[in-house]
Amino acid sequence: MSENKSFPNIPISHWHKLRVQMKRSIPGSITSNYVASVLGMSEASARANVIPSLRMIGLVDENDNTNQEMAKKFRNDSQYPEFCKEVLQNNYPQGVLDAFPDSDSDKSNVKTWFMNHSGVGSSAASRIASFYTTLLEANPDVEIKASKTKKATPTKTEKSKTKKKVATESNSQNQPVKDTELPKPKSQSGFNSSSPSLNINVQIHISSDATPDQIEKIFESMSKHIYKNK
């Protein structure tokens, strides 16, 4: 085929989303409204940036009708490599296929080639090169693997929370335990401060007919014999 100055230019994430959607059902037509709904973009953007590439690939014709045979190969994992090979043969010159025959080719050289042969800028050339490399890989499980990796990798917020938790636990474990001195018991007169204290309860029964002098004598006796140390 003659060298083409225009090449399919679809972001990889959009490509995989379209595959996932077509695995559910193949639409009768692929319109800008359909693409906008599936990819979450405006119809104008879908019409300008996605539909032309889908037409180059052969998934949709000029009247937005879906190529059912191509769509079946596109969504079928076992037929996906054959689909990619067909797209490569129909849309890329033999020169680029010979120079970069597999996905291990140097990405910067692939990008430079498309810049030189399509006249687009660096950003567009990067997208074209990435899509070309995706077709070379022809791996139907790429999106599944990417999804698993994303779930297994903690987010920055989760990493930050984990670091803070570990730091807090580490600081808590490294904190020296302060010795708390128990209050010393108050020393009582006549006893060694280290000796245990002794409490004595004395009950006195005084007759109701006792005279004041007798009561006074009783308390004087108590003071003399019981509280003599004070």
Image (spheres, grey):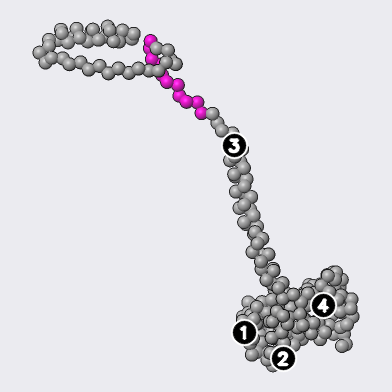
Which residue shows up at 61% across the image and 53% down it?
Answer: 161
Residue 141 is left or right of residue 105, and the answer is: left
Tell me the mark number nearer the camera, choosing from 2 and 4.
2
Alpha carbon separation for disc pair 2 and 4: 25 Å
Residue carrying label 4: 120
Q: Nearer the viewer, mark 2 or mark 3?
A: 3
**Quadrant of the image occupied by residue 154:** bottom right
Q: Is residue 221 left or right of residue 111?
A: left
Residue span colored magenta = 180-190
Q: Residue at x 39, y 12 (%)?
A: 191
Residue 49, compared with residue 155, is above or below; it is: below
In three-dimensional space, the C-alpha distance between marks 1 and 3, rounded to whole angstroms, equals: 62 Å
**Tag 3 or tag 4, which sits nearer the N-term?**
4
Q: Are marks 2 and 4 in contact (CB under 8 Å)?
A: no
Residue that numbered label 3 is attached to: 175
Look at 74% across and 78% down and name the residue there.
Answer: 10
Asked if disc 1 and disc 3 are in contact, CB closer than 8 Å, the reply is: no
Q: Is residue 118 left or right of residue 37?
A: right
Residue type, mark 3 in image:
Gln
Kind of residue sitting beneath label 4: Val
User: Which of pointers 1 and 3 lies earlier in the amino acid sequence?
Assistant: 1
Badge 3 marks a residue whose secondary structure is loop
Predominant SS along the magenta part:
loop
Question: What's the amino acid at mark 1?
Answer: Ser
Mark earlier in primary sequence (2, 4): 2
Residue 84 location (% of width, % of height): 77, 81
On screen, residue 136 above or below 211: below
Q: Which mark is residue 25?
A: 1
**First reached walking from the N terminus: tag 2 or tag 3:** 2
